[in-house]
Amino acid sequence: MINAKSKIKTFLYKYSPVVLLFASILNEVDFNNLGLKYFSFNFAYILIFYYSLKRSESLGYTFIFTAGLFNDVMIGIPMGTSSLSYLLICAATAYLRNITLRPNIFKDWIFFLITISLLNFISFIVLMLIFKYEVSFFDQIVNITFTFLLYLFFSRLFDLYDNLLLGKSNAR
Amino acid sequence: MEKGRDDFVIAIRSAFLKRGTQQRFSILSLILVSIIFLILGSFNLKAVDYLKNIIKDVIYTSSFIASIPENVIQISYKNISNHYKHYEEYKKIKSELEIFKTKDLSKQIIMFENIKLKKVIDDYFTTSNETYAKVLLDKESPFLRSIVLNKGSKNGIKKGMIVLDDVYLIGKIVEVNYLTSRVLLASDINSKVPVSIEPIGIQAIMSGNGNQNGIIQYINDESIENKDEDLLVITSGAGSVFNSGIPIGKITVETNLNNKDIVVKFYKDFTQLEYVKVVSNEKQIVDETSKKEFELNSEQISKFNNQQQNFEVLKQQKDILEEIRLKIENENSELKKELALSKSELQKLQDINKQIKIDQEEINFLRLNLLYAHKCRKNFYNKLYKVGTPEYKACILNKGKKIN
């Protein structure tokens, strides 16, 4: 019985980030577009950044690439745009892992801001200059701001979730 | 300094090229694949389109399945709230139905006349090429206001077809897959619809504002200033993109024209779409069938016109009868009044007559009293009647005491 419980917990610990990523993309509720003028955030960016940084093995690069393709199709932008953004987040987190000796949440946070700003800039270039999409700069600024601000909240939430599943000592 | 640069290069190289313990591909390889996808996407290659269509069909279906729990909750909530609204709506609709029933005939006439005139001016018109589709997904995107339908090229859907909800414009088909298709909503920022603003008849272009409204572009604001009623926005048919006369929304009186944007409020809420109608915007070729249809329409129009004329005659007759009835009613009431007046006058005359009779009797009594008072008045030496008593009066009228 204890063994089964432990197996379930391990399973959840291992696969919940991927499930959460695909659920957030395939579901009709999109935090990127809640219908509010001054509030939107990119949940996928937060999730990918957090788990790629903390547990790089939990979200496979192939899954992330596929999730990006799914997201592109769902929101109707050229296929490959989101995949590129998501993979660049992974690259950024891999770089941050390599250069970090003592992890610090605030350093991660600032690095997250730089990363998402760079990604949105790349997305702008791709969508506006190559594919001639009309993109609202203001909406994107709002999106970046709230994604940045909510990173702390969600990272704390994910920490709590991991602690709940494996216990504080194991999760860290 | 040199060492620092080496560390940076090593960290970058490691980040892009190193595969993790459970990673099949490196980030760099997948980034390259993404870029290839993007590059191929910018070319219109048939094989790539075919592959993309398959991927999209799979993803839309997966998304539809993934959204089932959420949709079930939404539908349940909607059903419950609808249940509460139902009765009120029923009453309202019932009363409206009565009104519409009366208007139906004239509407049919106008419709047929419209068909006839459109054919005369060779406008874009289709009646039979309609497909009804279910809204599979309406996931909102910051880049694209669109919905996904459960009908695709398999069901005859083509790029550029017009999508309606009831008779109101929703958008047009921008992407067709084998089983599904995507509709660019009129509220999308990239959507450009040639419109006509009625009743002032100004031509303009309407674009979406990315939310739930449209914006009128390329128009002189002065031309719609000082409006004191709602302005209707319908498709103008210019540019052959949309058929003419499809209602879209209205510019309300409350719209502040001092603002930069002239906002169009859509008749339909694009977030509440369930089933839509996809119609062709292709020009109808006038063939033998169309000619027959045209003749049939003409016959129907003349039939309806005759019916309308009959109705007019009947209506006039009804009006005349109503007028006569009112006249008679007025006369009746006048006569009743006169009768009541006559009755009261008669009563008055009768009263006068009665009074005269009484007076005459009194005069007669007084006259006789002068002559025969001595024969009836009681004295100390006779046993006649006391003055003022009825017996005395009777005695006077009998000209003395009657001896039996």
Image (cartoon, rainbow, N blue to C red):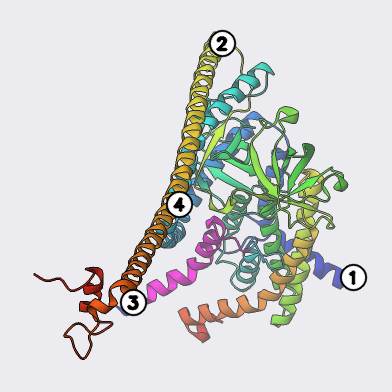
| Depth check, front residue: B257 or A39 | B257
Height in image: B164 above or below B284? below
Alpha carbon separation for disc pair 3 and 2: 79 Å
Three-letter amino acid code at the position of disc 1: Glu
Q: Secondary structure at mark 3?
A: helix
Q: Is residue B91 left or right of residue B160?
A: left
Three-letter amino acid code at the position of disc 4: Lys
Q: Secondary structure at mark 1?
A: helix
Q: Answer yes or no: are tags 3 and 2 on the same subunit.
A: no
Nearer-N-terminus badge (4/2): 2
The circle on residue B2 is 1
Q: Answer yes or no: are tags 3 and 4 on the same subunit.
A: no
Q: Which of labels 1 and 3 is toward the front?
A: 3
Read off the residue under disc 3: A3
The circle on residue B291 is 2
Q: Which of labels 1 and 4 is toward the front?
A: 4
> Where on the picture, by quarter, is residue B386?
bottom left
Read off the residue under disc 4: B337
What span is in magenta? A5-31
* Chain for disc number 2: B
Q: Position of residue A141 (x, y in %)?
A: 78, 65
Q: Which of labels 3 and 4 is toward the front?
A: 4
Q: Position of residue B16 (x, y in %)?
A: 71, 59
| Label 4 packing within 10 angstroms: few (<14), some (14-19), many (20+) | few
Three-letter amino acid code at the position of disc 2: Lys
Would residue B90 be visible to someone looking at this image? no
Identify the main secondary structure in magenta.
helix
Q: Which of labels 2 and 1 is toward the front?
A: 2
Alpha carbon separation for disc pair 1 and 3: 53 Å
Alpha carbon separation for disc pair 2 and 1: 86 Å
